[in-house]
Image (spheres, helix red, strand yellow):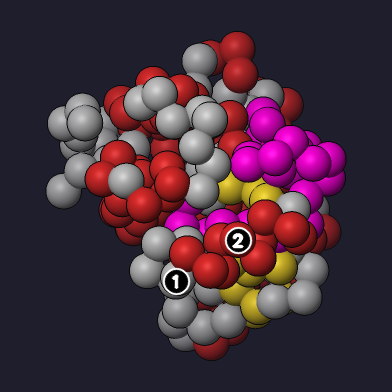
Amino acid sequence: DCCMLHLISQPASLQLSTKNATSSHNFLKMPPRDNTYHYQHADSLQERAAVELESMRSSAGTSSALHPMPPACARLFRTLPGNDECIDCGARHPEWATVSYGALICLECSGRHRRLGVQTSTVRSIVMDHWSQEQVLGMLEGGNYQLAQFFARHDMEDMPDRRYKTKAARFYRENLEKHVRQVKGMGFYPGREATRRKPLKQCETV
């Protein structure tokens, strides 16, 4: 299996702030037995998001069940570099997502992504649609800056529609999906920084 770790990980200066990382090692050591109690006593946004993800999995017994976007998870992935504007056109405060790439897009660009087809880009509204646990994890582990850097390395910055049909784009979304499965296998979500510290299997470059 491949992972995204050595392919698209961000510079340390642009990774999620340690303020939002695990501030309590003991808190994240074991999955919570009482999600309500742990949510109320969580010290950070990261911990609240982790409890929400655990609740998504335990409430229906499967990570593929659909739920409204958990508020702490949404707040957390909005803090990722580049997520304050659409990955394609730069419109501010995007409210839609291309789940396939873990990136945020605006309403207008969401229509273009829908026309690409779900095999290329799956679109969700952050507010109106329901999400699976894996889809939420993809948003937490992806991010607009990460995807933009990948496109820049492959000289695809000025081809916002065609770039999603390339072999490189397919490589990105397939490996993001594999990375998310590996992160899910870690159990209680330890946070973005921790998933990049784990000795996951290395990927081949494009």
Q: Residue at x 56, y 61 (%)?
A: 113
Against 123, residue 170 (above or below) is above
- In percent of width and height, residue 66 lies at 58, 81
Counting residues from the start of the chain, the first of labels 1 and 2 encountered is 2
Q: Quadrant of the C terminus?
A: top left
Using residue 16 as the reference point, say whether residue 128 is left or right of it. right
In the image, which is nearer the foreground, mark 1 or mark 2? 2
Q: Nearer the viewer, residue 1 or 106?
A: 106
Residue 143 point in image, percent of width and height: 57, 40
> Which residue is found at the position 66% from the left and 49% from the top?
104
17 w.r.t. 191: above or below? above
Q: Quick check: 22 left or right of 175?
A: right
Q: Measured from the top left, where is residue 171 in percent x and y?
A: 27, 45
The x, y position of residue 164, in whole percent, is 42, 49
Residue under label 1: 118
Amino acid at pointer 2: Arg
Segment tinted magenta in the rendering: 78-101
167 w.r.t. 37: above or below: above
Query: Does 134 appear above or below 41?
Result: below
Q: Can the viewer see residue 23? A: no
Q: Secondary structure at mark 2?
A: helix
Residue flagged by tag 1: what amino acid is it?
A: Val
Q: Which quadrant of the view contains residue 144?
A: top right
Q: Is residue 54 magenta?
A: no
- From the image, give the main secondary structure of the stretch colored magenta: loop
**Tag of residue 112:** 2
